[in-house]
Image (spheres, rainbow, N blue to C red):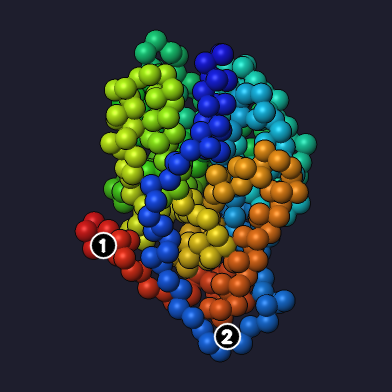
């Protein structure tokens, strides 16, 4: 239990203080075409949308950050208050600590706020046996959902992180069948954690009845990088070297989004830094965008700080809508764009 708390605190400290992003901005390769005569009034632009059956004021989710250690309650409360005030979605970090009874309050605190779309979080590696650890079953996933009154539970795929993590759970055999079992009983989103999806993997997931995909591709926080720093601090030179080697491993989010055939709603997270990136994601076919580290520093301060950052994202989104002549999100989804640079090379190579 102490190990779980310590690891989660490590993750937050590293994300706040170390370089954890590969560097290349793939979203900048997606260029929305400027409409010099937009015939749209900025004050009348409608950013509201329906995401997974919930009405949001603009298409954004603060995706999974944390839970399960001292300090996490304040972070989640600040995010929840801001998301409730602005009418957007929120996910929590892995609820393993809550399921195992280490800490429930840092998760359940979000029930004190009226967040319109709430997403729980359970790791796919925990759905199968790991080095003597029991596998979570459907009841455990339902417990995670009930802990925060979640509308959906994200089953996160984080094997890049696990293979670098000194104490990582690296058995991946059986995850697909476990996700299928959970999806029969609980509304499931499958979420990557910074490495994206091949189209073939998405096709497999569609078959088990998942409700949505959070692409969470390469370009934002690299959990290989996060675990690299933890390995260094533990004087584990082998794991640290593996982390260095795979620092920029993965498929960029725009690439995964463009290549996907989108049979279920796509959430575009991974490297989203601005409201312009949100607009780009919508134009590529996502139902909404998401980010976590974008508001982490603010979340350690106050709900007002988080809210200010999110309002900036919303106003940048509205500016992009005006400049593309998009009066609402439906129109933005059809906005013309071109794809350049490394992202275009990725698409040609897949």
- Toward the viewer: 38 or 121? 38
First in sequence: mark 1 or mark 2? 2
Image quarter (top left, top right, bottom left or bottom right) of the C terminus = bottom left
Query: Total of numbered circles in the picture?
Result: 2
Asked which secondary structure carries label 2, the reply is loop
Residue at image coords 65%, 61%: 312
Residue 133, percent from left and from top: 43, 13
Q: Which residue is mark 1?
A: 345
- Toward the viewer: 321 or 21? 21
Instruction: Decide if residue 241 is on the left or right side of residue 220.
Output: left
Judge whether 1 appears above or below 306 on screen: above
Residue at image coords 67%, 28%: 71
Q: Which residue is mark 2?
A: 38
Instruction: Decide if residue 207 is on the left or right side of residue 90.
Output: left
Residue at image coords 44%, 22%: 233
Residue 16, percent from left and from top: 55, 38
Judge whether 167 appears above or below 200 on screen: above
Callout 1 touching callout 2 (CB < 8 Å): no
Residue 144, percent from left and from top: 60, 28
Residue 302, percent from left and from top: 74, 42
Asked which secondary structure carries label 1, the reply is helix
Q: Residues within 10 Å of mark 1 (few under 14, many from 20)?
A: few
Residue at image coords 26%, 62%: 345
Image quarter (top left, top right, bottom left or bottom right) of the N terminus = top right
Q: Which circle, 1 or 2, is nearer the viewer? A: 1
Q: Residues within 10 Å of mark 2 (few under 14, many from 20)?
A: some
- Is residue 21 visible in the rendered structure shown here? yes
């Amino acid at each position: 239990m102490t190990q779980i708390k310590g690891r989660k605190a490590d993750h937050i400290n590293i994300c706040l203080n170390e370089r954890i992003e590969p560097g290349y901005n793939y979203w900048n390769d997606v260029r929305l075409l400027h409409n010099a005569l937009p015939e749209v009034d900025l004050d009348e632009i409608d950013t509201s949308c329906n995401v997974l059956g919930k009405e949001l004021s603009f298409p954004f989710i603060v995706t999974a950050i944390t839970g399960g250690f001292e300090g996490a309650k304040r972070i989640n409360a600040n995010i929840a208050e801001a998301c409730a005030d602005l009418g957007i979605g929120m996910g929590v970090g892995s609820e393993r600590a809550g399921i195992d009874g280490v800490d429930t309050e840092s998760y359940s605190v979000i029930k004190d706020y009226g967040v319109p779309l709430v997403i729980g979080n359970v790791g796919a590696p925990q759905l199968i046996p790991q080095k003597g650890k029991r596998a979570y079953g459907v009841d455990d996933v339902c417990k995670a959902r009930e802990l925060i009154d979640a509308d959906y539970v994200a089953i996160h795929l984080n094997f890049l992180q696990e293979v670098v993590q000194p104490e990582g759970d690296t058995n991946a055999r059986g995850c697909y069948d476990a996700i299928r079992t959970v999806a029969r009983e609980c509304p499931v989103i499958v979420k990557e954690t910074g490495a994206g999806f091949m189209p073939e993997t998405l096709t497999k997931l569609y078959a088990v009845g998942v409700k949505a995909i959070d692409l969470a591709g390469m370009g934002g926080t690299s959990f290989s990088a996060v675990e690299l720093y933890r390995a260094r601090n533990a004087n584990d030179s082998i794991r640290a070297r593996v982390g260095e080697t795979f620092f920029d491993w993965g498929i960029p989010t725009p690439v995964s989004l463009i290549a996907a055939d989108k049979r279920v709603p796509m959430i575009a997270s991974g490297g989203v830094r601005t409201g312009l990136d949100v607009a780009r994601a919508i134009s590529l076919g996502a139902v909404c965008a998401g980010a976590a580290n974008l508001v982490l520093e603010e979340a350690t301060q106050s709900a007002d700080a988080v809210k200010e950052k999110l309002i900036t994202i919303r106003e940048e989104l509205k500016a992009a809508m005006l400049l593309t002549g998009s009066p609402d999100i439906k129109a933005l989804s059809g906005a013309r764009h071109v794809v350049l640079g490394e992202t275009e090379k990725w698409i040609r190579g897949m």
